[in-house]
Image (tube, rainbow, N blue to C red):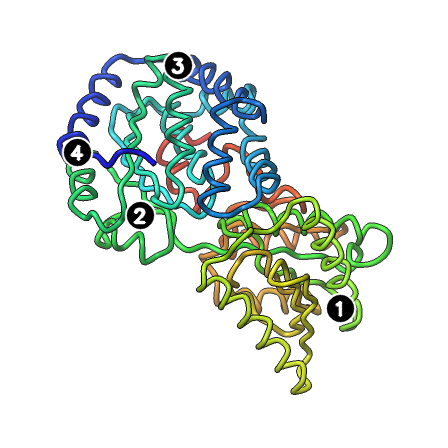
Amino acid sequence: MLTLPTANQIVQGARSLEAAIGDPIAPEQVAEVLAAVLERWRDREFAPRHATILQIARHLGFSIPLLEESLDALLAPFTRDALAELARRVTVRRELLGFVMAGNVVGAGLHEVVLGLLAGAGLLVKTASREPWFFAELGKTLAHEDSRVGDRLQVFNWSRARADLTGALREVIDEVIPYGDDSTITAVGGGEVVGFGSRLSAALVTRGAARGAQAEGVARRLARDVTLFEQLGCLSPHQIFVESESEGDAVGFAELLARAMGDLASRLPPPLHLELEDAAALRSVRETARWRAIAGEPVRPIEGPGLSWVVVFDRDADLSPGPGLRCVRVSAIRNLADLASRLASIRGKLEAFAVAGNGDNLSKTRDLLAALGVSYLAEPGAMQSPPLTWRHGGGWFLDRMTIDQ
């Protein structure tokens, strides 16, 4: 665990950042440094990565194979070429940015941290009590690779209960960039900041993709999207809509998905333990589904052992968040108009949407999702690896830090 800072140390950290950004570095040079650092972090044998994975596994109870594959997915888009391309798009900014990180997903916020560094900003990062290790170790690797770039990142850790330290952060930076749910954003910024608040992701399996030989592969890839990061991030799908002629087609896909979830759980084991409120939420989903099925509603739970995973077929459900932790709904839709009505209540809160299928209607599907505010249209299996130009949270930070091209 990181040592709790004092308010004076936060002030001194900001002064160090001011000095660092007073020494300009070309974005292309920063991109080269970041490429070298992130290439090391993609190596599972890299000691700081290994130590970080072990710490998170011990603290949160997540399995090491699950954490390894999740981090692989996060880091995959940060290639040398992608970083160089993004460096050509940034607008240089001499300012201090304060990041208040969430602890639900290891490495959450990496896209914006990289973007800020490429743009020449100084970054003061407050990590979450739940996960204080990733950015601290990444910062050390960065400083070891190139001290001039490393000096532009200061990492501290304190709990949300220390409002005095959060207040000190706000006093010394030009803008605070908070992560977390909407209540967290409000608490950090007092309603005066724009952050990355509550967002929800889902998937669509078109009529052709839900049938035949390809359906099994689609189910496996979507099971991976659900499983990585224990379904706790904004890119994790909570519901899969299956375009079908009959309820049976959607039920059949739910069964394929359940089989894939079970196979994946044997390779990427679920958490070793759960917090009481998480376990209660997962039990509630199962019990509610069982009672609704007994009452004759078109609902069917397909469960793994214990609380390891569950697929709930809920034919007519609108999109809504679940508890995460490998709990996903499958619903049937008739057409795009039906899909639009199921998503209407979440308009403006959609982050990623995976679409499986092809054909003449695919472009109309993408147009609909874009109009509903989806930030990332993905292929099944790629939801957890958005490109560096991902318009996270609607793209406000990306637009702020780049030149429109």
- The three-letter amino acid code for the residue at tag 4 is Val
- The three-letter amino acid code for the residue at tag 1 is Val
The quadrant where residue 111 appears: top left
Proximity of marks 2 and 3: CB atoms separated by less than 8 Å? no
Q: Earlier in the sequence, mark 4 or mark 1?
A: 4
Q: Position of residue 89 (x, y in %)?
A: 44, 25
Find numbered disc 3 in the image and state the secondary structure of the residue it sits on: helix
Q: Earlier in the sequence, mark 4 or mark 3?
A: 3
Q: Position of residue 97 (x, y in %)?
A: 28, 33
Residue beneath disc 4: 172
Residue 251's disc number: 1
Residues 66 and 85: in front is 66
Alpha-carbon span between mark 2 and mark 1: 40 Å
**Closer to the eye: label 2 or 1:** 1
Q: Earlier in the sequence, mark 1 or mark 3?
A: 3
In this rendering, is residue 299 above or below 107?
Answer: below
Residue 144's disc number: 3
Alpha-carbon span between mark 2 and mark 4: 18 Å
Residue beneath disc 2: 194
Proximity of marks 2 and 4: CB atoms separated by less than 8 Å? no
